[in-house]
Image (cartoon, rainbow, N blue to C red):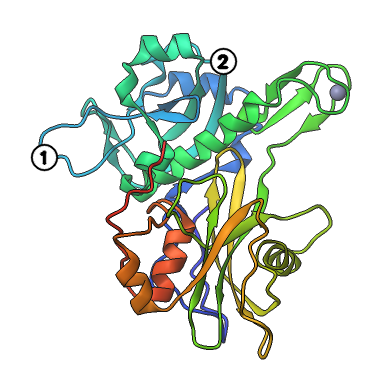
Amino acid sequence: MLQPDVPNPAGAPQAATPPPLAREHLDRDAVTRTQQGRAEAFDADPNARVLAVHAGRVLLVEPAAGETGPRLELRHPSALPEPEVRCYLGRTLDASADAAGAAVPAGSPVEAWIYDAGAARSIAEEVRWGGLRRVATGLDDRDAGLALEAVALANWHVTHRFCPGCGSPTEVVSSGWARRCLEEDRLRFPRTDPAVIVLVTDDEDRVLLGSNAMWEQDRFSVLAGFVEPGESLEAAVVRELVEETGLAVDRVEYLGSQPWPFPASLMCAFRARVVHGASTVPVPDGEEILELRWFDRDELRDALGRVALPGETSIARWMLEEWYGGPLASSMPWSTS
Ligand SMILES: [Zn+2]
């Protein structure tokens, strides 16, 4: 469904732009998922379109001269081989044209078809399959929303071929929105793992950035971690900061969220401040975080030639730019796959 136009709650920080992957322009049409005969009607509908998905990547249109950004290649179902799994994504809200130039009216149904490596090779050459980290920010809102929904669902199907309760095989039901255990007749639904990501500031409005042990040197970002079972988002913010930096924070404010289907996260962004009067000397945990540094805005701008900041697809980059008050273009690449 479309995002309702909710006024900003009093006192909450007002972001100038939404997070880069918090985009959707589609009617998810959930009521249709369980309708009898839906798939057959889809296959017979001349306006039906399919997004092919393989290994977390989506099929892209071959770039034409003068084209500004990537576009999804949506094909009629008759122009694709049978997939492993098909998922109904919803209906388009605006009229458009597909890659072949055929009209796709508003209200056209769209499915994701999920393929293995062999089938993917038969559909298109390697270069036409785009990973979301690389292409998602270049897609328009409709295509970004379709690609995120498709990849997130595909990632779930790959790891749920067997029932987590009894180990028996499962089958796809509800147009790809559930799997049913063949032994227990029990339904399992797609899950999303919440993670908190936190922009920490001190009384001078400096920002705390950390360098993660898994990254190359000179990469710095805001701090993040998964929400633990039985924990609120706000408690996860406070706990993560103590664990990774030794700092006590309070004044936890929600900033926004975006899907991060690598493979199944929802990034929930917060701002938090070091407790007034408490130590601002960070102590890296030495395992996950190797180095922590405070930056004021001038220091961060001056460091852009020496430190790499997270990629423009990430909510971390969005949070940093919201704090900074404008774009932050580092000359050091943060390579992504
Ligand atoms: Zn079972």
Identify which residue is drawn at 42% across, 15% down.
Answer: 120
Circle number at residue 84: 2
Q: Quickly name the residue at label 1.
A: 66
Marks 1 and 2, Cα distance to the nearest angstrom? 35 Å
Amino acid type for the residue under numbered disc 1: Gly
* Picture quadrant where residue 126 is located: top left
Q: Nearer the viewer, mark 1 or mark 2?
A: 1
Decide which of 131, 111 is in the foreground and name it: 131
| Direction from residue 188 to residue 134 in the image, left or right | left
Q: Residue furthest left?
A: 65
Identify which residue is drawn at 34% across, 78% down.
Answer: 298
Circle number at residue 43: none
Q: Quadrant of ligand 1?
A: top right
Badge 2: how crowded within 10 Å, few (<14), some, or many (20+)? Answer: few
- Could you tell me residue 175's position as x and y percent? 61, 28
| Direction from residue 190 to residue 114 in the image, left or right | left
Relative to 108, say whether 2 is above or below: below
Relative to 126, say whether 48 is above or below: below
Identify which residue is drawn at 25% across, 29% down.
Answer: 99
Residue 89 in sight here: no
- Give the secondary structure at mark 1: loop
